[in-house]
């Protein structure tokens, strides 16, 4: 099972994409920027989760 960070990171990334799109539609630059920031945070969190998964996999071998 993937690490919770991977799941939460993917969700945050997706939420950021939605926020950014909503900002584009409404012309709200702040919302667009928040969406982009959420995407970056989600990608980082997802990467951390991937590293945790890899380390856990290495310990089992």
Image (cartoon, helix red, strand yellow):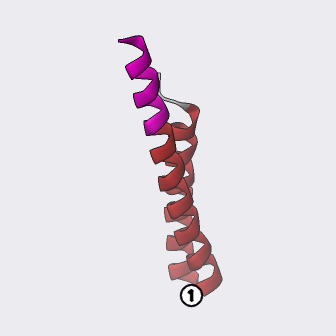
Q: Predominant secondary structure in magenta?
A: helix
Quarter of the image where one finds residue 51:
top left
Q: Quadrant of the C terminus?
A: top left
Quarter of the image where one finds residue 26:
bottom right
At horizontal 47% and vertical 21% (from top left) the residue drawn is: 1
Quarter of the image where one finds residue 4:
top right
| Image x and y of residue 34, in percent | 62, 72
- Residue wearing tag 1: 27
| Image x and y of residue 19, in percent | 57, 67
18 relative position to 57: left or right: right
Decide which of 3, 7 is in the foreground and name it: 3
User: What's the magenta region?
Assistant: 50-61
| Image x and y of residue 16, in percent | 55, 62
At horizontal 46% and vertical 22% (from top left) the residue drawn is: 56
Please, which residue is most extreme toward the left here?
Answer: 61
At horizontal 40% and vertical 21% (from top left) the residue drawn is: 57
Tell me the SS state at disc 1.
Answer: loop
């Amino acid at each position: 099972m993937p690490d919770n960070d991977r799941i939460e990171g993917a969700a945050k990334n997706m939420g950021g994409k939605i926020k950014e799109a909503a900002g584009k539609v409404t012309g709200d630059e702040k919302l667009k920027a928040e969406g982009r920031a959420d995407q970056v945070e989600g990608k980082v969190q997802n990467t951390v989760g991937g590293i945790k998964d890899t380390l856990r996999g290495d310990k089992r071998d």
